[in-house]
């Protein structure tokens, strides 16, 4: 039972030193912290009755994890108890930095060795998009990423996609191969008949232009599908 005169614990400084996220990060490294603890470092203070870690846990539970926080409109996040404009901006900025880190080319270019490698490169961002986007991952002869180019925004169907647009940047960068990626805002990555038709047209054009089309991925929320693995649109 809480003592009547006990001090409410809602600041990180009020936690025992062994439980403070910043001290744990300094001692154990960021990988040892939970998502709620990392969010708590951004928030710094909680609200009466909830310390910063508990506020982080509440946000993660409400939005279904970091992916949900990434997708949440900032106006809605601002309205959450204990957040406000500054803290919402800090959370969104931290998530965006994490997203950019996944797509920035390191000194040694990232190599794509499987559909999973390609999906991991784009899924974090593309699973949160509210419209369909079609992108191409351009690769060199060793399947290292040269660039990721957005080609379409909007409905991706066989009547609207101009296949030549997908290969324009591949030719400009002298790419040897490419992987097509688009998202389903519904969250269900099941390929549609249009997805298969677009894939078939793209692979045929790739043969003519001597650019290997290695795969076409459909990104959903927490899931993705490789049309190549399913034998859809590839012969």
Image (cartoon, rainbow, N blue to C red):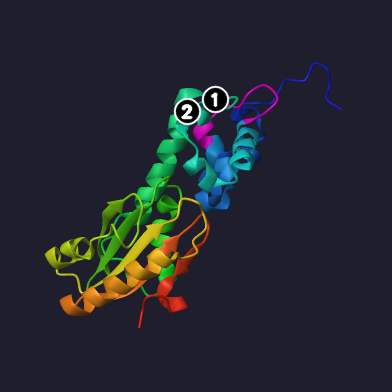
In the figure, residue 1 lies in which quadrant?
Answer: top right
Q: Please state the horizontal and vertical placement of residue 174, each as a whole percent of the image.
A: 14, 69
Magenta-colored span: 41-51
Q: Is residue 49 magenta?
A: yes
Q: Please state the horizontal and vertical placement of residue 221, each as a whole percent of the image.
A: 51, 54
Judging by the rendered image, the residue that carries numbered circle 1 is 79
Secondary structure of the residue carrying tag 2 is: helix
Q: Is residue 126 above or below residue 144?
A: above
Question: Horizontal placement of 76 versus 232: left or right?
Answer: right
Q: Is residue 56 magenta?
A: no
* Mark linked to residue 75: 2
Residue 141 in view in this figure: no
Question: Horizontal placement of 204 versus 218: left or right?
Answer: left
What main secondary structure does the magenta stretch of the protein show? Answer: loop
Give the quarter of the figure containing the C terminus: bottom left
Residue 16 in view in this figure: yes
Q: Quick one: 195 or 16, which is closer to the camera?
A: 195
Q: Looking at this rendering, what residue extends furthest in the front direction?
A: 159
In the figure, residue 94 lies in which quadrant?
Answer: top left
């Amino acid at each position: 039972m809480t003592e009547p005169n006990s001090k409410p614990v809602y600041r990180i400084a009020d936690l025992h030193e062994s439980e403070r996220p910043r001290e744990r990060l300094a001692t154990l490294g960021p990988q040892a912290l939970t998502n709620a603890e990392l969010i708590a470092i951004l928030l710094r203070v909680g609200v009466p009755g909830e310390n910063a870690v508990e506020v982080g846990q509440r946000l993660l539970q409400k939005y279904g994890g970091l992916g949900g926080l990434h997708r949440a409109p900032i106006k809605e996040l601002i309205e959450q108890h204990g957040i406000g404009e500054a803290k919402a901006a800090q959370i969104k900025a931290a998530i965006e930095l994490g997203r950019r880190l996944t797509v920035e080319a390191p000194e040694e270019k990232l190599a794509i060795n499987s559909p999973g490698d390609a999906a991991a490169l784009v899924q974090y961002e593309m699973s949160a998009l509210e419209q369909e986007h079609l992108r191409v991952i351009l690769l060199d002869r060793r399947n290292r990423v040269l660039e990721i180019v957005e080609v379409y925004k909007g409905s991706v169907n066989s009547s609207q996609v101009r296949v030549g647009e997908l290969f324009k940047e591949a030719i400009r960068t002298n790419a040897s191969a490419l992987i097509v990626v688009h998202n389903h805002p519904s969250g269900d990555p099941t390929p549609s008949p249009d997805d298969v038709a677009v894939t078939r047209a793209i692979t045929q054009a790739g043969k003519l232009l001597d650019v290997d089309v290695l795969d076409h991925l459909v990104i959903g929320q927490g899931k993705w599908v490789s049309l190549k693995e399913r034998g859809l649109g590839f012969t």
